[in-house]
Amino acid sequence: MNLQKLFLTENACYKAGKKIAVKGIMVHSTAANNPWLSRYVGPDDGKLGKNKYNNHWNTYHPGGREVCVHAFIGKLADGSIATYQTLPWDHRGWHAGGSANNTHIGFEICEDDTNNAEYFGKVYREAVELCAYLCKLYCLSENDIVCHCEGYKRGIACNHSDVMHWFPKHGKSMDTFRADVKAELQKQEQPTKDNTPASWSKDAVNWAVENKLIVGDEHGNLALRSEVTREQMCVFLKRLHDLIKK
């Protein structure tokens, strides 16, 4: 995943400053033949490219509408794929047209003409990795992910067809998407050895070892996947307390 950040600070949604308790993720697509992130995210940060029409969403009401999402996935100026976070994840977005605004992170995948298999494969994979990242961040599972049209069927979003007008053209559905997110989560949770941290935790584990907040057994095994007892937690907290006092 190529995660960048450029908050839409001029958008009325950002200025409203409301927060949510995140309970799910909603997948959207833009319904326009324009895969370039600069159409929606701006101003140019040197990677996006210039939007010559200046009609990106970093305005009070883009196109006169009350709309804003937490992220966009699409092309940078050099043609590579990236995710741009455009709101804090726990900010109340304006993406669902229903009660999902109060509970769900919403992101848009920039559409092309919906027939390019290479482009679809790249943004689909980026979306899978983004959802796995958010699931870990907010203790969600793949079952907490819906697309806009599924949200409509559940009564939590307005009547839009995305993303099921696009995914099936390339042999995908929301069920396969959720399965791919689940597989990504499982892959991240299964390092080669119990003593080897997963990529998402490596820096934190190394820091904890260096500061003696966790120690291995006589063989140096950190037992990273073992359950933590209250007794072990007390030892950890005491070590953290002693570290802070230094």
Image (spheres, helix red, strand yellow):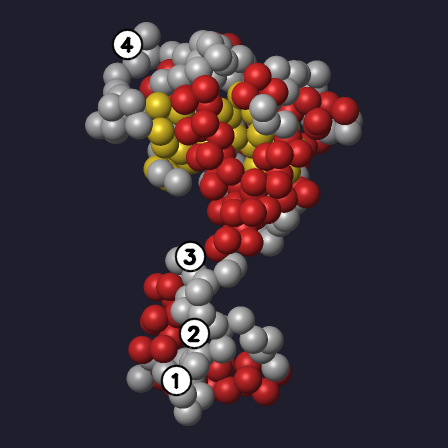
Residue at the spot of label 1? 220
Residue at the spot of label 4? 52
Q: CA distance from mark 2 to mark 1?
A: 8 Å
Is 165 left, or right, of 15 in this rendering? Answer: right
Q: Earlier in the sequence, mark 1 or mark 3?
A: 3
Residue 76: percent from left, percent from top: 31, 25
Q: Nearer the viewer, residue 73 or 65?
A: 73
Q: Earlier in the sequence, mark 2 or mark 4?
A: 4
Q: Earlier in the sequence, mark 2 or mark 1?
A: 2
Quarter of the view holding residue 160:
top right
Q: Nearer the viewer, residue 226 or 211?
A: 226
Query: On screen, 155 above or below 229?
Result: above
Query: On screen, 202 above or below 119?
Result: below
Q: Earlier in the sequence, mark 4 or mark 1?
A: 4
Which residue is rendered at x = 77% and y = 29% of the image?
154
Residue 53: percent from left, percent from top: 32, 8
Residue 37: percent from left, percent from top: 37, 22
Q: CA distance from mark 2 to mark 4?
A: 52 Å
Residue at the spot of label 3? 200
Which residue is rendered at x = 53% and y = 41% of the image?
131
Q: Which mark is residue 230?
A: none
- Asked which secondary structure carries label 3, the reply is loop
Q: CA distance from mark 1 to mark 3?
A: 21 Å
Q: Residues within 10 Å of mark 3 (few under 14, many from 20)?
A: few
Which residue is rendered at x = 48% and y = 40% of the image?
130
Please say if the residues under marks 2 and 1 sit with CB atoms less than 8 Å apart: yes
- Asked which secondary structure carries label 2, the reply is loop
Please say if the residues under marks 4 and 1 sit with CB atoms less than 8 Å apart: no
Q: CA distance from mark 4 to mark 1?
A: 58 Å
Residue at the spot of label 2? 195
Say which of marks 4 and 1 sits in front.
Answer: 1
